Amino acid sequence: MVIYLSGEVEEESRLDEMTPRQIVAELDKHVVGQNAAKRAVAIALRNRVRRQKLPPEMAADVMPKNIIMIGSTGVGKTEIARRLARMSNSPFLKVEASKFTEVGYVGRDVESMIRDLTEIAVDMVREEKIEEVAEKAENNAEERILDLLLPQRSPSNFYDFDADAAPDEGASGDRDEQFQKTREKLRAQLREGKLDSRLVEMEVREKSFPTIEVAGPQGVEEMGINMKDMLGNLFQGRTKRQRMRVDEALEYLIQEEEERLVDMDAVARAALERVESSGIIFLDELDKIAGRESSGSGPDVSREGVQRDLLPIVEGTTVNTRYGMVRTDHVLFIAAGAFHVSKPSDLIPELQGRFPIRVELDSLTLEDFKRILTEPKNSLVKQYKALLETEGIELEFTDDAIDALARFAVRVNEQTENIGARRLHTIMEKVLDEISFEGPDLEPKRQSIDAEYVGRTIDDIVKDQDLSRYVL
């Protein structure tokens, strides 16, 4: 009962219209098995929608139901959380708990995860706003390119002046009409790409500025951001003239127009609200920091210190970011770990209480590997078929080939390190190495992969355990 998934998520149904059962059904398109974990995250996501419909005074007291996923590597913990975030259009950040250390040890500050999540939310909202103004930005950029190609105050570009002639209103009207005709002709050529190679000279902003790193109480990361902002404001007004191709100039001007049309203050406000109401943080390797203070020094102190530093973030606190203050009360935390050596009860009691939902993910079986190869919407088999089809190669996998691939993946996992479904990537790459290398020169174009072909390519490697540790 496992998972693996791949590919991008297409336009989904509106989340606030989806029941937990429908959320699980949507996850089933990309993730195989692990129904208990899917149910848990579906309920957590649905509870968010329910909370937003409550009166404000009650909604403030409804805390997110944080989750601990227990399972070995490669069984789908990260992918379930990532798919959930994509489905809900929520800011999503994956971070390893072992990267954080308490004050006095080398490592990252726990508050940096909220700053990183805020950056992700700002990028999401900015992209959405850019899509809204994309058409207007392209039109504005097109007009600016036409102004460069045909300046309105340079009539010699499109007609002749008789400097000694007396002003003639009729002639002036003809000139205006001629100007518009020439401009529209250039517009048509521009849209057809006929002017792409022509050079134009334009003013561009200088974006380079000195890099200064300063360590402060907020940490090197946040101080670096603040210095970048200050120096960026200092240098952003400087421009220089530069010659570039029309297609490059058009792309530059589109970006410039998008920046001008998008209100970054509104973007920041929307991003902060999105983080606070729908942010998701996937806290991996939680088992690596599970431990109680035993001797008063050494790694146990650091692990428990990280837990105590994480506690206020999970419990709900205010974090200062470059865009403003962020409350973490309603950020959903999904923690994960193998918990082979430690167990969730080894966490400090306060932190345990902040993760009320525990789900254990199933280990992968032979049947699971077969399903992973074929069932997900963008399964590995479908991916490789599509990749090679771009070069005219029609790839076919027989049923016994799927069985062989799954058996070899299980066997290598047993003989070496068990990395779950990720083993299928290494197996598939080795099996298709020759076909991928030959590419468009391969004959015949129709290639069938059967169990014999799979065995011929990797059987010797699998038998040699020392070699398989390095190759597979």
Image: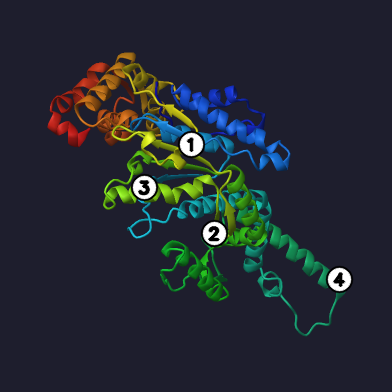
Q: Disc 3 on helix, strand or loop?
A: helix
Disc 3 crowd, CA 10 A, few/some/many (<14, 14-19, 20+):
many
**How many neighbours does mark 2 have within 10 angstroms: few (below 14), some (14-19), or many (20 or more)?**
many
Q: Distance of mark 2 from mark 4, alpha carbons?
A: 63 Å
Mark 3 or mark 2, which is nearer the start of the sequence?
Answer: 3
Going by the numbered disc 1, the residue's amino acid type is Phe
Q: Earlier in the sequence, mark 4 or mark 1?
A: 4
Disc 4 residue crowd, few under 14, some 14–19, many 20+, Cα 10 Å: few
Is 139 situated above or below 468? below
Residue 134 drawn at (x, y percent): 64, 51
Marks 1, 3: nearer the viewer: 3
Asked which secondary structure carries label 2, the reply is: strand
Name the amino acid, label 3: Glu
Residue underneath mark 3: 304
The reply to whether discs 4 and 1 touch (Cβ–Cβ < 8 Å) is: no
Quadrant holding the N terminus: top left
Distance, label 4 to label 3, CA atoms, is 87 Å
Q: Secondary structure at mark 4?
A: helix
Quadrant where the image shows the C terminus: top left
Quickly name the residue at label 1.
Answer: 355
Q: Earlier in the sequence, mark 1 or mark 3?
A: 3
Q: CA distance from mark 1 to mark 3?
A: 16 Å
Give neighbour class at mark 1: few <14, some 14-19, many 20+ (Cα, 10 Å): some
The reply to whether residue 292 is visible in this rendering is yes
Q: Residue at x 48, y 70 (%)?
A: 227
Query: Which of the two discs, 2 and 4, sits closer to the camera?
Result: 2
Q: Nearer the viewer, mark 4 or mark 3?
A: 3
Q: Which residue is mark 2?
A: 321
In terms of sequence position, does the residue under pointer 4 or pointer 3 come before the other? 4
Q: Residue furthest right?
A: 169
Q: Residue tagged by mark 4? A: 170
Circle 4: residue type = Gly
